[in-house]
Image (cartoon, grey):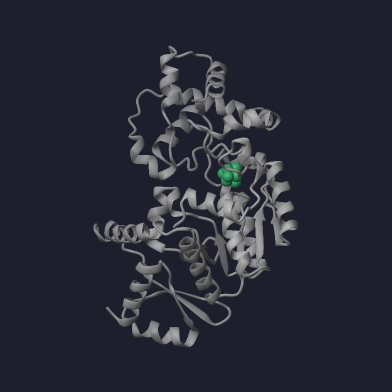
Amino acid sequence: MSNIEERLEARYFDKFLPLIYSKSFGQRLIDSSPHQLRTWESRTGKVAIFHRPPPTIKEDAFAKPERLGRVIKQLAVCYRKDLRGKVALAREVLRTLFEATDNVAVAFSGGRDSLVALDIARKIRPDIPVMIVNTGIEFPESIKYVRQLAQDWNLNFYEVKPKVDFWKLTGEQGIPVAGRGNTTFMRDLSNKADVKLSNSCCRRMKETPARQFYREHKIEGVITGLRVSESLMRKLNFADYGALRYSKTYNTLIAWCLYAWKDQDIADYIQKYKLPLNPLYNMGYQRVGCWSCLQDMLYKDSRLFTLQKQHPKLYDVLIKNLGDEMMRLYSVWADIEDFELDTKELEGLYRPCDFVMLEQYRKENKKDSRTDLLDLEIENPS
Ligand code: SF4
């Protein structure tokens, strides 16, 4: 292994970060390696050199699990740190990003994780651009909250919007249910219910306007509140790419500065620094994104229950627009008899349907009315 590769490996498994050098020095190191190294160049003459992701399972069955094992071991060390230690880890990721480029923005969602990331970032760079995508289907409370925060914290704040309309998009491309719509189960559900499902909603409504913003503002690095502990998919992705990686989608570096933070760390930080929280959390919402999103409509703890209770008017708009499709999906879902699905197997992919509701439905002697079924699901959340 060449010297540079040893350095990359040490940096990766210690801090999950790339090495940043001036372009000329970096180039000499790159040339010295017998392997093709993954690199990224800033406009300001810096180069980031990344530790290579492991080969695919097909190429080498053991490389990925081995890498994951090493990453999880080091993550366990990070998880054990106290709040001060977690803030230090976050600041180290941000320092590395600022070393690579000055053109950095915070991607703010209005949620608690990105609030913490924003607070840490603004304490380093008070004038850092803060961008939020207003999809047009944000909760009114969220929009009011972020605008107030922008004013109170004197943020260098940008609100960007997609050119597409959610209702038009879902009418043309399908509705975003269970996040993907591309597993065998979801395809089966979609076909049987004759409801088009789509996985392009986030891409069109959020990614495209964000990418445009970064391009227009020459942003080269983006700070997010993404955390590893949120899902298995995140862990797998993190093991391959670490806390600061290049995103082809946005053509920027992306920083996961809160990678080692747990729910309790987020809560402790918010309490310690008395950060103002999005009021939706006090209304019982766990997620504060688009109110008409149906990604979790088949989950036992679907946000639809809270929407119906806290925002009945918005809920009615949703049912008026997509109620037919929802009922068809619920009905077919409950009627599917012949699929064998190991929920644990899919858990890491998108936290799939909880089958409690299906079992409940079966116990109720298979009521045949679609309206009854919808009522049952909505009114009796477990
Ligand atoms: S969160 Fe849901 S509704 Fe919002 S853009 Fe993504 S898929 Fe669409």
Q: Is residue 70 visible?
A: yes
Q: Is residue 126 above or below residue 168?
A: below
Q: Nearer the viewer, residue 66 or 210?
A: 66
Residue 240: which quarter of the image? bottom left
Q: Is residue 220 above or below residue 235?
A: below
Quadrant holding ligand 1?
Answer: top right
Residue 360: which quarter of the image? top left
Residue 376 at x, y percent in the picture = 53, 19
Q: Nearer the viewer, residue 326 or 142?
A: 142
Residue 382 at x, y percent in the picture = 48, 25
Q: Nearer the viewer, residue 228 or 134?
A: 228
Residue at position x 53%, y 25% in the image: 328
Residue at position x 68%, y 33% in the image: 314
Q: Nearer the viewer, residue 110 or 289?
A: 110
Asked if residue 322 lies left or right of residue 236, the reply is: right
Residue at position x 42%, y 26% in the image: 356
Q: Is residue 184 above or below residue 107?
A: above
Residue 312 at x, y percent in the picture = 68, 28
Residue at position x 60%, y 26% in the image: 324
